[in-house]
Image: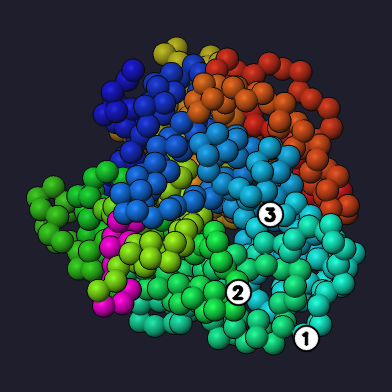
Amino acid sequence: MTEEPTLREACQGTPPLSARLEPWMQELLADPATCSSLLERYGSPLNVHDFSALPRNAAELTEVAEASGVELRIFVARKANKTLGMVRAAHRAGLGVDVGSERELAQVLEAGVPPHDVVVTAAIKPDPVLRLALKSRSLLVLDNLDEVAASRRVAEQVTGAPSAEPGRPADRASDAPGPFPVALRLAPKPSDLIPPTRFGESARTWLELIDSGGLGDLLRVDGVHFHLHGYDPIARATALGEALELIDALRERGLAQDGAFVDIGGGIPMSYLDDAGQWDTFWHAHDRQASASGPGGGDRAADDDRPATAPDAGEDAPDAGGDAPAAPLTWRGEPLRQVYPYHQQVIRGPWLKRLLGHEIRPGTAAGQALREREVQLRCEPGRSMMDGCGMTLARVIQRTSASDGVPLVGLEMNRTQCRSTSDDFLVDPILVRTGTRDDATDPSVAGAGQSRASERFEGFLVGAYCIEAELILRRRLAFPQGVAVGDVIALPNTAGYLMHILESASHQIPLASNVERVGGGEAGGSGGDRPSAEVADRSSTVGADRSSTAVEGSDPRPDVPGFKRDGIDRVLPIRA
């Protein structure tokens, strides 16, 4: 296996932000022939997955919970990664799945995940979502009063019996199933610690609804859910304390009895970088550049784990003499205003330990309060469960420059295929040398998609959309060995959100394909791609005109040895 320094030496940020690489990533990136074969077979860009890290990531949380005497249930956020391989891997690991749409729910159920392992948290829930959730008896998280009214109406349609009006028992058959399980989404009180949220209702609003009989008798409240922006464990513990007060009030009303839970949502942190010094050095250089260019510098995202005041980076800092860098480290010198905290010190297990140990009232820690009430703790992590589970490969198509001479490397991908709500992906790519030929002196000699490597340079990665600022990464990168047409750029650790959450098929450019390593998280061990085909077929019929559309026919070409295409690629993101 090629050592990590050798893998990283062909491409580095200025200054570098070196990705943490799983062993399977190092193995693949050290095999240029396989990287090239994957793009030749499945197209560029390509999302490559290996879910073997998923159980380990989950165990970091469950071990802390067990040590604290707290029962923990993890539901992996499907929105973080759309593949069916992720669903199967979560199910094999004994985890539940959090879904945000009718299609996600249908696919998860068809993949064999039982309804009691599914939570439906969709921000907007049209009737087909409510109907499938209620029919399957998956847990439905109710967000607001209109959603309660819609759920009552759909529940009446599903059962064929009207919900009871206040003061009048419902007319239901003796053999009818019990009421449908739901959770109430709490909007915690805003404070200096807890930001306002668009999700949920206040505890007072929920209790007034219940006391007025507005919940009906077809919906059974089993727990409380909340969603907070940011990663502060103390803010999460504070909101947990408010949720437990609502649990107490619900129990006084005969609800949330045995098996009650509080679900704290997602936002459990991870770290893409191991080197805290690199993270500090980058922000030192970034903030000096922003100061040199005047007001309007970058804003720190909440809990971004970067110093409030840039530290002294020492003699090794770029341009440590104090002057602004000769070449801007970001595109056109524009500051990064909102970014994910790509380096964090307190992640997963230690983060949960800090949350459970925080006193939510004098003398009572969060973990103790959960134990005393025998209330289960639930969470819905996405990114932190996908840590180490995937990366994106893209082919170098061209080397050019802007009209002012700024060097550019054109990739066969677009910026939405490695993007989240963060302004940039602050992780250095890996350059895999697959395009260079020693005898490639000109295009007539070079093989297809090959060329002689350029001279060393620093520049930017650009994509396929016809937009001036179509940047794959907004940071300037150094290529000390040059770049050749046909080389592969690997974007590490993109499985959580970055691959899928904002991907677009604009310009009629196909979405990226998704493959899974066979044997990596048992890709071929659960029926291979047969469950994927079943899910695609089910998705093409569920919800009538709101259905997804399966791709007609099948590709006769064999998979690349050691890899299998994910069945989600058979489902087009359109309605029939």
**Disc 2 residue type?**
Gly
Q: Earlier in the sequence, mark 1 or mark 3?
A: 3
Residue lying farthest front? 174
Residue 142 % position (x, y): 65, 69
Q: How crowded is mark 2: few (under 14 residues within 10 Å), some or many (20 or more)?
A: few
- Residue 352 within the segment the image draws in magenta: yes
Quadrant location of the N terminus in the rendered image: top left
Front position in the image: 382 or 223:
223
Q: Which residue is drawn at 65% across and 81% down?
A: 210
Residue annotated with mark 2: 254
Q: Is mark 2 on a helix, strand or loop?
A: loop
Q: In this view, does 365 lie to the left or right of 103?
A: left
Residue annotated with mark 3: 138
Q: Residue at x 80, y 40 (%)?
A: 538
Residue annotated with mark 1: 167
Front position in the image: 154 or 440:
154
Q: Nearer the viewer, mark 1 or mark 3?
A: 1
Residue 147 % position (x, y): 72, 73
Point out the stretch of residues depicted in magenta. Answer: 351-362
